[in-house]
Image (cartoon, rainbow, N blue to C red):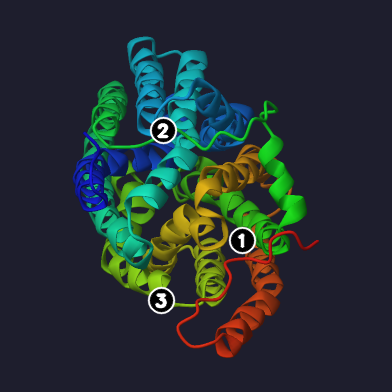
Amino acid sequence: MSLTRERRTQLTFRYEAFRAGAAGVLETASGTFLLLIAVRWFEAGAFAKGCVAAGSGLGYVLAPVLVTAVEAARMPVSRAAAHLALVGAAALALAALMPSLAVFVAGSMIGIAAAGAMHPLLTQIYQDNYPARSRGRFFSRTMVIRIASAAAFSAGAGSILASDLGYFRAVLVVFAAALAFSSWCLRRIPSTELHVSGGRHPFRALRHVRDDRVFRTTLIAWMFMGFANLMMLPLRVEYLASPAYALMLPADAIALLTGVVPNLARLIMSPIWGWFFDRANFFVLRIVLNIGFAIGVASFFASNTMSGFLFAAVVHGVSSAGGDLAWSLWVTKLAPPERVAEYMSVHTFFTGVRGLLAPMLGFFLVAHWSITAMGFLAAALILIASALLVPEAKRHRLAVRTAPPDTPPAPADQGQT
């Protein structure tokens, strides 16, 4: 029996709300705890730390291949995402059972890569099952649950690891269980097969970069911003935890600054950004978020006091609340509805490229440059990204002003190069 649109929306929101708690726990894995374990327990070198930090990037790079495989298999997208989550759960469980550095690095990368690779499939689900006029609102509601879960788990796991770092194996088990529960939730979300294009090349979706000028410009801007952000995110833990910087904060303080405080700021701001996403000029929204990220990254690495770190953590959290939503849903503003997964796979692919390269480059450069100088370099790259979007913001505003009454502006000038 086919479901009505309203019923599909209800079921999607219900199980996404359930899954959001697990997603919040997993968010702390890539954002804080896996790298903290690598630095403090395994005393890993720059390459190993870079690999752990690049797990999401690996998943994003593989996203176009995954979308092609799911399309060829004629598999409902939610079932494919559920299978992927189980693979990630198994990898993290193995890392908990066999805690050597090599297994830990491999298990961490595969587990986090599996969580990252499913994003184009999730975006297609949101496109198909959430109404366009309220897509940001539905997404931001589940994000509130996710953020609250991330903040609570950061505080709890940080306290546990501060008392005895040997409990890291239990933390890895929790991460594996979160992915397994995510798989259970995803199996229950209604979805359809991907649009069949007839193509076989796994990277054929990259043609949209050539054919869609607005999409191409936005991707270039996102590359500047994302590279800067992903280069510096793992260095936050390095800065606070490594003896090289003499701060040597305890695990619970690191979790507070990289997990609890930013997530509390995200918790407050996520519904507000969801409201703006549904109504505002997307390019103006992205520019405002970029400015916040630039202030956050510069102030964090220019600080050496708790008050400075707290200010930077709040600014970063406020910006991340909108950044999460914009990253996950922006292609629904530009792409034809049946091509959302393809557009998102391109976006995640380039996110993956920078996600693989940026952490490695960050750990390499920090051996030669001061970490404060790198913070200001990252802020400059983010401001360049903002400048690239100013013409698109103006063009979009003009299109809205000149459109006939009750006629929405075209989502993108597809086909123009």
Q: Amino acid at mark 1?
A: Gly
Residue type at the position of mark 3: Arg
Pointers 1 and 3 in contact (C-beta within 8 Å): no
Q: Which mark is residue 375?
A: 1
Residue 381, position as x, y percentages in the image: 69, 64
Q: Nearer the viewer, mark 2 or mark 1?
A: 2
Residue 375 lies left or right of residue 125; in this view the side is right
> In the structure shown, which secondary structural element does the residue marked by tag 1 occupy?
helix
Q: Is 232 left, or right, of 23 in this rendering?
A: right
Is there a contact, CB below 8 Å, between mark 3 and mark 2?
no
- The answer, for residue 377, to whether it is visible in the render is yes
Q: Nearer the viewer, residue 122 or 297?
A: 122
Q: Position of residue 226 (x, y in %)?
A: 60, 54
Q: Earlier in the sequence, mark 1 or mark 3?
A: 3
Q: CA distance from mark 2 to mark 1?
A: 39 Å
Label 1 or label 3, whichever lies nearer to me, is: 3
SS of the residue under disc 2: helix
Q: Give the residue at mark 2.
A: 77
Q: Earlier in the sequence, mark 2 or mark 1?
A: 2
Q: Nearer the viewer, residue 65 or 239?
A: 65
User: Please, is residue 210 above or below residue 378 in the view?
Assistant: above
Q: Earlier in the sequence, mark 3 or mark 2?
A: 2
Give the spatial CA distance, label 1 vs label 3.
33 Å
Q: Position of residue 206 (x, y in %)?
A: 70, 43
What label sits on residue 279 in the rendered view? 3
In percent of width and height, residue 416 lies at 77, 63
